[in-house]
Image (cartoon, grey):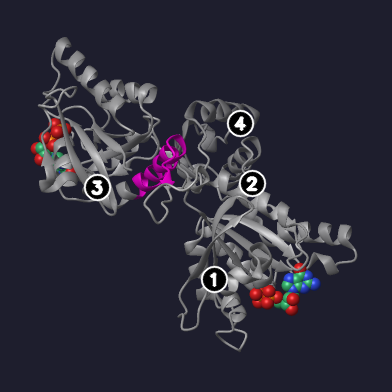
Amino acid sequence: MSFTLAIVGRPNVGKSTLFNRLVGKRLALVDDQPGVTRDLREGEARLGDLRFTVIDTAGLEEATDESLQGRMRKLTERAVDMADICLFLIDARAGVTPTDEVLADILRKRARHVILAANKSEGSAADAGVYEAYGLGLGEPVRLSAEHGEGLNDLYSQLMPVSDEFEKRAAAEAPQTEVLLNEDGEAEDPDAVRTPTAERPMQVAVIGRPNAGKSTLINTILGEDRLLTGPEAGITRDAISLQIDWDGLPVRIFDTAGMRKKARVQDKVEKLSVSDGLRAVKFAEVVVVLLDAAIPFEQQDLRIADLAEREGRAVVVAVNKWDIESEKQQKLRDLREAFERLLPQLRGAPLVTVSAKTGKGLDRLHAAVEKAYDVWNRRVTTAHLNRWLAGMIEAHPPPAPGGRRIKLRYMTQAKTRPPHFVVMCSHPDKLPDSYSRYLINGLRQDFDMPGTPIRLHMRSQS
Ligand code: GDP
Ligand code: GDP
């Protein structure tokens, strides 16, 4: 199952150069195939481990008269309709032109998914054009140089999640079935038809100090038998992970020392070292920071939680061994207060109390993890954001250093996982951090985004 990518853009931005780079020698001209005009080239592209069909609106000349412009528009529309993903190229050296605006408009209205790329962006001469591209409202531009082969990694990281998404959707829409055959080569009864789930599991790491209860938690979620067949003797210090079905949620759980201990690979209780924690955090999409209710927010917990935030992971804080707490109400208040004071950078992250031993609270943990993941992946539309921004500015205008008010002109979400927002503004260097925090807290509250870091960049408009 693969997807179709259309490279669109006005003439001369480098579409063919990129097409040739993606397709290499495997170029196939398909202009004799019915339904495809001779203006659309098609080829099989390879980028990293991705395989996809790429189409290019080749053979256009710079539109000098109406008929040519009309033709370009039609051809672009056709390519857009054929594609799952559109890669919209602009020329970073030339900046955004009126023709680019026209095409951006078509893409916004018609395309299923758009990735914006600023080509010819080798060297600093392209910087202004790259920033201008933000103003198209199509997200953060990928800096590319088709000619020099630069930026393909970034293109890959943009394509990968979308490609995953398409595969997921395709699998859901047209479930492929696998028929189990008996010894005679006949299909067994209809119940033997299986539908494979193509969903990619959510990557979760449970981290915390030794004895916080990580293994107990994973065991409880998993059922002990299945865990013990997982990690085996002889494994290295490298990542150990297991895929499980957590009450209907496909999850790949990552653990280090705890699992090895349970698997009796090592007799000695191994300390969760910072490098173990680091590896776990890098691997994960959602990090569950597991605290021991008796000794919460120890130095090591704080470091790991901070690391998870800096790495941009979704974070859920779980306080374990809640079964042995007697003053639950008071304790919870104390925990919330300590959380706010010691981990202000994780503001908004959910805090849930659990007992790994009895299983109490694990349903709430499940819900918090699922929600944090959802929010981490969320995309807010540009129209929505700009309406919201106008309201925020009205309620609390930005300062006016030296009598000149800083203008926030435009806002867009450039990325997800975690959410990144870009605000185009005058004098971003003069905008105090408190104003950024005001916007971030507002985003978190108004768009209901707990459990994820939010990145906000101020960019000057060139
Ligand atoms: P198309 O009309 O959009 O298909 O554009 P082409 O691929 O034919 O490229 C137009 C011109 O831009 C050619 O002269 C290319 O060599 C040049 N070009 C393409 N990519 C780059 C790039 O990354 N950097 C620079 N500096 N030039 C490029
Ligand atoms: P790890 O080092 O983080 O993997 O911690 P373990 O899962 O090995 O647990 C450390 C100790 O805490 C063990 O003695 C567990 O039985 C105990 N423990 C773990 N979870 C709970 C819990 O929810 N309640 C209570 N009372 N004890 C727990």
- Callout 4 secondary element: helix
CB atoms at circles 2 and 4 under 8 Å apart?
no
Image-quadrant location for residue 320: bottom right
The amino acid type of the residue labelled 1 equals Gly
On screen, 342 above or below 385? Answer: below
Q: Which mark is residue 277?
A: 1
Q: Earlier in the sequence, mark 3 or mark 1?
A: 3
Q: Nearer the viewer, mark 4 or mark 1?
A: 1
Seen at 13% across and 25% down, the residue is 39
Examine the structure image and report whether residue 366 is included in the region drawn in magenta. no
The amino acid type of the residue labelled 4 equals Met
Residue stretch in magenta: 157-178
- Callout 2 secondary element: loop
Q: Earlier in the sequence, mark 2 or mark 4?
A: 4
Measured as percent of width and height from the top left, residue 395 is found at: 65, 29
Q: Distance from label 4 to label 1 (Cα)? A: 38 Å
CB atoms at circles 1 and 2 under 8 Å apart?
no
- Callout 3 secondary element: helix
Seen at 60% across and 63% down, the residue is 305
On screen, 138 above or below 65? Answer: below
Q: Which mark is residue 124?
A: 3
Q: Is residue 448 left or right of residue 403?
A: right
Measured as percent of width and height from the top left, residue 43 is found at: 17, 39
Q: Look at mark 2 in the image and give the residue it sits on.
A: 450
Q: Look at mark 4 in the image and give the residue it sits on.
A: 392
Measured as percent of width and height from the top left, residue 359 is found at: 75, 62
Q: Earlier in the sequence, mark 4 or mark 3?
A: 3
Q: Is residue 133 left or right of residue 453?
A: left
Question: Callout 2: 10 Å neighbours few (<14), some, many (20+)?
Answer: many
* Ligand 1 - quadrant of the structure image: top left
